[in-house]
Amino acid sequence: MRLQKLASLAAVLLLAGSTAFAYQPAGQAPDGADLSNHHTYQNRDGDTVHAPARSLSGKAPEGATAGCRDGTYSFSRHHSGTCSRHGGVAQWL
């Protein structure tokens, strides 16, 4: 019985990881229609966070925490490493 529960939980986690906004516990999930990509990454806390993306409307997306120097917006939950592959932070939001 316990093994079945673990297998079911593993299946749910695999399916959740394949969605655009699998898990966004802190703050608001960004509006995917306004973003240039739907990629996510797992941060050091184990939370799934939207990867940096460009805003199609030109406005800062909901949930963005920083604007990167390359014009993308970050949804990072920690200052360390934010926009590190995007030229660094241009502005904290």
Image (cartoon, grey):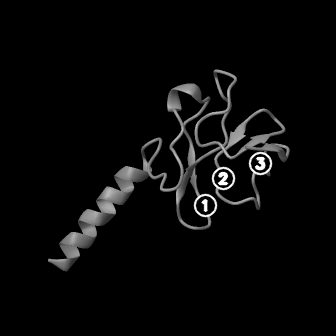
Q: Which residue is mark 1?
A: 43
Against 53, residue 17 (above or below) is: below
- Mark found first going from the N terminus, 3 or 2: 2
For label 3, the crowd category at 10 Å Cα-Cα, with few meaning under 14, some 14 to 19 and many 20 or more, is many
At x 52%, y 60%, the residue is: 47
User: What amino acid type should be assigned to the residue bearing mark 3?
Assistant: Cys
Q: Which residue is mark 3?
A: 83
Instruction: Check residue 63 in the rendering and tell me which mark sits there, or answer none.
Output: none
Closest to the observer, 33 or 91: 91
Secondary structure beneath label 1: loop
User: What amino acid type should be assigned to the residue bearing mark 1?
Assistant: Asn
At x 62%, y 29%, the residue is: 36
At x 64%, y 42%, the residue is: 64
Secondary structure beneath label 3: loop
Tell me where residue 80 appears, x and y as whole percent. Answer: 76, 62
User: What amino acid type should be assigned to the residue bearing mark 2?
Assistant: Ser
- Mark found first going from the N terminus, 3 or 1: 1
At x 26%, y 68%, the residue is: 7
Q: Are marks 1 and 2 in contact (CB under 8 Å)?
A: yes
